Image: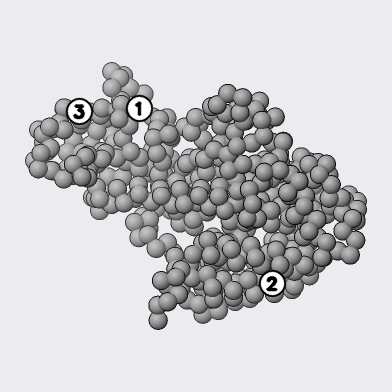
Amino acid sequence: MNPPEDQYQQFTEVLSEEELRRLAAAYGVADQRERKLPIRVFFWLMVLSAGQPTVRGALFQLVAFFVAALSGLFPMAEAFTLTKMALSLKLKQTDWFFFRGVYNRLLSRYKELLPPSQLKQLDAFKEAFILDATISRVHKVLNKVFQSVHEDQAACKVNVKYSLKNLTPEKIQVTEGKRHDSRFRGVTQQPGVLYLFDLGYWGFMLLQKIIQAASFFVCRLKKSCDPLIVAVSQKRWQPLVGKRLSEILGLLKGEDHLDVTVKLSKAKKPRFNADIRLVGLLYEGTWRFYITNIFQTAFTPQIIYDLYRQRWAVEIFFNVFKHLLHVEHLISRTKNGIMVEIYSALIFYLLTQIVIALAAQKIGRPIESFSFQRSFQLVRAFLVTHLSHLLDRSKAGLNEFFGRLVEAVALLGLRDKIARSP
């Protein structure tokens, strides 16, 4: 089943020279002189640099790549200012909101392309987000902007609101490395949303905010929290009411799960006094406890646990983000440049996801049958070897390039077991 041509166009229009220049002008980064590095060239080379198979150890490596990439495309590559100083200024002065604007436009169109999620448990929610963060090293000259937990070092924390339904970040917030995760502003007033997060985000204020928004959460129970049991889901657990969790562990012999309603706060006049569901599963002789405000009986303790396990998706994303797109070490010496690098990597990641989705539709396969790493390598090879098509001033040329890229991923991007199956 071939995707219609206009599904290529809805993405290539965002990436066309005309649209990139228009969006750049909106953020005050329009080209002022032709001898300067044009914004469309700078945009694509920043995106391309994110996919290069070498760690971003120095700006000189990026300069060398720029020169090599442009030498075969423009007869007079010196017409563009490609010195180390010029690129440093470009990273400093090109408003990173321009890159974020491109990412958000691509993301909104990508969502329209996606089929329903394969995770049926998520059908009950309007969206499902994982809240998590990762640390990236930055140059020590930025230690006043991005303070690290380690003395005399600098690091930024990339907080991510990662969508389980489209497997892409919906929002990021870059802060100093020592900032606590719980300060991430990832929860909104949108109702019907599921939030999954680990103990780094634990806090009664966050739980209260989710409940007030008529949304839902699943989180592990903090070890220092000893909730009071106020109601039970089965009669045999009735004797547990009025006791704290620490008091009833010895009474659970013969049980393999627990499902009760609790109060989390120990304060006499607690600010957070909502009823919370506590579920427990016995795994290899050890109890695992999770809290949630999902009380529907259809969501059994096992399903609650299965939902929490979906957090692994963001760990896979971070592995790609840091090691394939080399965001573990950022080279810019300005906060603006750091944001440009991060959003360049996000755009590369999203472009790969878009191509996978189009390829899946083209051959009638689910998105899950494609290997992200294999597809990423194909996208990277196409972007580098077909740079002239990326910089083609015509939308038709860019659209043709996109179509060929989708065909290549449809043919070669499947996982090994899928590719061998009849």
Residue designated by label 1: 272
Q: Is residue 302 above or below residue 279?
A: below
**Residue 386 percent across, percent down from the top left:** 72, 68
Q: Residue type at mark 1: give it.
A: Phe
Q: Residues within 10 Å of mark 2 (few under 14, many from 20)?
A: many
- Viewer-proximal residue among 130 and 54: 54
Specify whether residue 258 is in view: no
Precedes in sequence: disc 3 or disc 2: 3
- CA gap, disc 1 to disc 2? 55 Å
**Which mark is drawn over residue 401?**
2
Q: Secondary structure at mark 2?
A: helix
Q: Quadrant of residue 147?
A: top right
Task: Please rate how many residues cluster around mark 3, counting C-alpha atoms within 10 Å: few if below 14, some from 14 to 19, many from 20.
Answer: few
* Place of residue 55 in the rendered image (x, y in percent of width and height, measured from the top left): 63, 48
Q: Which mark is residue 246?
A: 3
Mark 1 residue crowding within 10 angstroms, few (<14) / some (14–19) / many (20+) = some
Which secondary structure, mark 1? Answer: loop
Amino acid at circle 3: Ser
| Residue at image location 39% in from the left, 63% down from the top | 118
Q: Are marks 3 and 2 in contact (CB under 8 Å)?
A: no
Q: Residue at x 44, y 65 (%)?
A: 368
Seen in the picture, residue 55 relative to 116 is either above or below; the reply is: above
